[in-house]
């Protein structure tokens, strides 16, 4: 769908299919280094590039933009390869001049799997990606390096993740073509370790880095083009968790010591709105939520169900946790508990998702789909089905039990909570109690509870009730995403809505992890919530 994004801005939306960039004569490619005490954005330190973006209507738009590369956003960086950001500002769309001085700013991270993400090798918008992990900051063995392509490609909404599950450039390209400013920050990640073998990208490094990047942007109001009071974060998977955490934890004092240590700019780190696709978050309760949701489904790798005792014990933990949240469902559903959550998901998300999907098919395609999926009933206007039918339709689950705090410390989340030269640690009492690696202690380390609060948006919405949180939320998840529980994003939405926030949350029917089937709608939503369309 197209949008009107202000005077002189082309209407464009939908899926960015291709993007080709070419450089033109202009200034240096390097922005301010951020070393010492200088965190001043240099407006002249950019190149001029041209890229083409194709919208869902099939129309290709030519966008000329200014590109600032690898600006270090803290005064005392631990690793500039990751603690830097790129800025892209449109100046001409389809031959018409664009003034983006008051445009919304899309703050799009490409983090996946809580891995390190760098924009330092990019030569144009959308060139950031995963990289790093070996001593000295090199890429981990067998891992792809960060993209350095001058021609970022968004091959389709549902091919929207990189090798570790982080977002590709679809949202960034569409935002640029709509006349918005795009900031792409890098961030440290869990696999990074120095020459002494110490891990320097474990929790809370990634969220601290992203907050520092927001502070850099806001501190340079009037120098960086765009409205620094209208920053909209976006991310997928772990990047979606970090985006929602940025939204929930704006200006929280909990992060101040970490930000001061890095020499972050003296400015607010609150964002205006948050976009989160399939957020992998609420990690300390994710194992229980996963078993409540997918406990009866066979594990993809084995074809067998997970250990029944473990699954049932974790499921019971979820029931206790969910009751303690005292959340109420959207649209007057009432209290959300483990006993009625299946009914809530069906009514609020799953049946509407299937209904929209079926309504969009041709008569013949719909008939074929219904014939192949007998669990689903269609009355011509609405799709209905049972929770059991839905679970059978999804099929195998991706992860075993526990899904996140593994007894053998083998998950990425175990690595996320590593410390010093220790690669991985337990972060739940249940995981520690059942450790199989031979640890002498069967308790979580004393610093873990505080780290969990730093990494969980639910803490800032329900416990801290942060008044500086964002008030606008865009949350998306595929119905066949078994990387986490469907309750995780639903709880996030319910928590924000319970505080009176504007929440736009839906599930993509039959889509898996990383799906983004309505990127044009997201770009239009930004214009709506920021008021940019009216201006």
Image: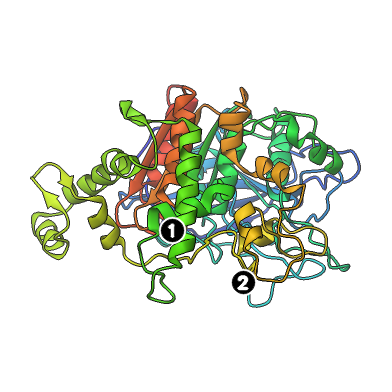
Across and down, in percent, residue 287 comes to 52, 54
Across and down, in percent, residue 342 comes to 32, 45
Residue 405: quadrant of the picture: bottom right
Residue that lies at the very extreme toward the right in this rendered image: 36
* Quadrant the N terminus occupies: top left
**Residue assigned mark 2:** 144
Q: Is residue 137 above or below residue 102?
A: below
Residue 528 visible to an observer of this rendering: yes
Q: Could you say whether the residue bearing mark 2 is in a helix, strand or loop?
A: loop
Q: Is residue 526 left or right of residue 303?
A: right
**Residue assigned mark 1:** 513
Residue 170 visible to an observer of this rendering: no
Q: Is residue 331 left or right of residue 485?
A: left
Q: Is residue 150 left or right of residue 363?
A: right
Across and down, in percent, residue 353 comes to 27, 46
Q: Is residue 4 left or right of residue 386?
A: right
Residue nearest the viewer, comparing 305 with 1 = 305
């Amino acid at each position: 769908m197209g949008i009107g994004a202000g005077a002189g801005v082309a209407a464009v939306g939908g899926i960015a299919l291709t993007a080709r960039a070419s450089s033109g004569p202009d200034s240096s490619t390097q922005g301010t280094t951020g070393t010492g005490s200088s965190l001043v954005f240099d407006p002249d330190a950019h190149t001029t590039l041209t890229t083409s973006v194709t919208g869902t209507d099939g129309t290709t738009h030519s966008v000329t933009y200014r590109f600032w590369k690898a600006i270090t956003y803290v005064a005392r960086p631990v690793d500039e390869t990751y603690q830097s950001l790129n800025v892209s500002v449109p100046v001409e769309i389809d031959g018409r001049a664009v003034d983006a001085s008051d445009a919304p700013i899309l703050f799009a991270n490409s983090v996946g799997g809580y891995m390190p993400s760098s924009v330092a090798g990019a030569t144009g918008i959308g060139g950031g990606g995963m990289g790093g992990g070996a001593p000295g900051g090199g890429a981990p063995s067998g891992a792809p390096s960060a993209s350095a392509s001058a021609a970022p490609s968004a091959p389709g909404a549902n091919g929207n993740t990189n090798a570790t599950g982080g977002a590709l450039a679809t949202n960034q390209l569409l935002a640029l073509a709509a006349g918005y400013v795009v900031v792409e920050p890098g961030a440290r990640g869990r696999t990074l370790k120095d020459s002494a073998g110490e891990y320097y990208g474990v929790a809370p490094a990634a969220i601290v880095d992203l907050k520092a990047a927001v502070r850099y942007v806001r501190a340079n109001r009037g120098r960086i083009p765009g409205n620094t009071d209208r920053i909209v974060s976006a991310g997928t998977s772990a990047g979606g968790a970090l985006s929602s955490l940025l939204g929930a934890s704006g200006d929280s004092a909990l992060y101040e010591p970490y930000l001061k240590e890095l020499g972050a700019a003296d400015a607010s780190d609150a964002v205006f709105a948050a976009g989160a696709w399939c957020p992998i978050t609420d990690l300390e309760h994710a194992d229980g939520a996963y078993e409540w949701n997918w406990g009866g489904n066979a594990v993809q790798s084995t074809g067998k169900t997970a250990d029944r005792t473990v699954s049932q014990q974790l499921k019971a933990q979820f029931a206790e946790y969910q009751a303690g949240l005292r959340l109420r469902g959207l649209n007057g559903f009432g209290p959300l508990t483990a006993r009625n959550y299946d009914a809530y998901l069906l009514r609020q998300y799953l049946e509407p998702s299937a209904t929209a999907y079926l309504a969009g098919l041709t008569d013949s395609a719909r008939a074929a789909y219904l014939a192949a999926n007998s669990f689903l009933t269609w009355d011509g206007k609405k799709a209905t089905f049972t929770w059991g039918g839905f679970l059978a339709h999804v099929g195998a689950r991706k992860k075993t039990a526990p899904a996140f705090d593994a007894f053998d410390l083998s998950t990425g989340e175990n690595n996320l909570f590593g410390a010093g030269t220790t690669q991985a640690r337990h972060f739940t009492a249940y995981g520690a109690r059942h450790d199989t690696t031979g640890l002498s202690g069967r308790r979580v380390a004393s610093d873990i509870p505080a780290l969990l609060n730093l990494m969980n948006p639910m803490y800032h919405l329900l416990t801290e009730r942060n008044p500086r949180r964002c008030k606008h939320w865009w949350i998306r998840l595929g119905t066949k995403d078994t990387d986490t529980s469907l309750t995780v994003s639903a709880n996030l939405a319910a928590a924000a809505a319970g505080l009176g926030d504007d929440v736009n949350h839906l599930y993509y029917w039959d889509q898996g992890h990383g799906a983004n089937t309505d990127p044009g709608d997201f770009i239009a939503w930004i214009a709506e919530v920021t008021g940019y369309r009216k201006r």
